[in-house]
Amino acid sequence: MATAQQLNTQFGINKRLRFSDDAPVKGMPPDSRPAGSLGAASGLIIAEIDNAQATASLCLQGAHLMSWRPKNQAVPVVWLSRDAKLAAGKSIRGGAPVCWPWFGAHAIESGFPGHGYARTVPWQVIESGSEPDGATRLTLRLVESEKTRAQWPHASKLDLTVIVGETLRMELTTENTGATDFVISEALHTYLQIGDIGAVRVTGLDGCDYWDKVGSSTLRKQQRAITFSGETDRVYINTSAECVIEDGKLKRRIHVAKSGSLSTVVWTPWAEKAGKMGDMGQPEGWREMLCVESANAIENVVKVAAGARHTLIVEYRAEPVQ
Ligand code: TA6
């Protein structure tokens, strides 16, 4: 794998895109760096983006965007747990984990990692650049190995392009490079930062069917906006709708617009589950995050024909509310 110095030579963009193995997480208060974020200790490399419009950080393992803060926002839009840990082969709590080539538990192998392996294996940088509007673009590709092929015996490529500016755009492209069709489920499992879970509502999914995963999985229909008063774990199906998180405490709206995705997952663990997870940040970090995930899951799995490509795209935008 390339070193930070080699990556800076090949893909760095002045001060706007730098690679390091010991980077503070941009957009997060200094005292909230993820535990173990001394990359040198973990051996992980982090890309830091700092342009006129925004700051962001991304761990090359998992192509895991960890934070994003537009410079017109005092508070980051993508949440990272204060207890997030950087460690080889381990998922990072917060940011935008890539769930692929399956979402949730593996359909057959209970020993395979939940949400697939993409978020815990090395990815390599394949391209970087600046957009005409000044946003910073970075594209990474999952590095296959015997381990990945043991869990996913299909010839494929997986690329993630992130475009960091006043909006955050993420494009996850699956290419079937083999001779037989395959089926994936997937998600950009993004943790968004909110003022307090009791002061937000999510609009855009009114009338949509969803699988309620709290307790036994039950099919229900959404009535009006989503508000939160307990553990909420829902997979909305057959919807390409844009969602809006309306944050009454931070006085902002976060727009989540997507294409190539027919499922939207809405999740908060609430107190008891958060306490068991142990890395949601003390004392009540879970109250300051809400997952709105752009996915293809359950009824919406995707068949990628031999030689074909499929791209899931999501764009986040934050705006103040008067
Ligand atoms: O997307 C919601 C969910 O599937 C929840 O059921 C919960 O398990 C969450 O993902 C977190 O999963 P993780 O493997 O990142 O701890």
Image (spheres, rainbow, N blue to C red):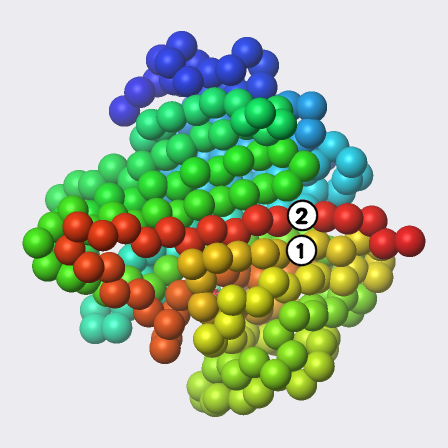
Badge 2 is on which residue?
A: 317
Q: What residue type is disc 1 on?
A: His
Q: What residue type is disc 2 on?
A: Arg
| Secondary element at image label 2 | strand
Label number found at residue 49? none
Q: Earlier in the sequence, mark 1 or mark 2?
A: 1
Q: Is residue 209 or residue 277 the one in the foreground?
A: 209
On the image, the x and y values in percent for residue 308 come to 22, 52
On the image, the x and y values in percent for residue 189 come to 49, 56
> 73 above or below 239?
above
> 217 above or below 10?
below
Relative to residue 289, is residue 115 drawn left or right?
Answer: left
Residue 100, quarter of the rendered image: bottom left
- Residue at x 49%, y 44% (from the top left corner): 170
Relative to residue 244, is residue 300 drawn left or right?
Answer: left
Outermost residue, front side: 132
Residue 64, quarter of the rendered image: top left
- Residue at x 31%, y 65% (from the top left corner): 302
Labels 1 and 2 touching (C-beta < 8 A) = yes
- Residue at x 58%, y 25% (from the top left corner): 132
Q: Is residue 260 or residue 228 the one in the foreground?
A: 260
On the image, the x and y values in percent for residue 217 come to 45, 86
Outermost residue, left side: 179
Label number found at residue 255? 1
Q: Is residue 23 visible?
A: no
Counting every numbered tag in the picture gives: 2
Relative to residue 101, is residue 148 drawn left or right?
Answer: left
Residue 251, quarter of the rendered image: bottom right
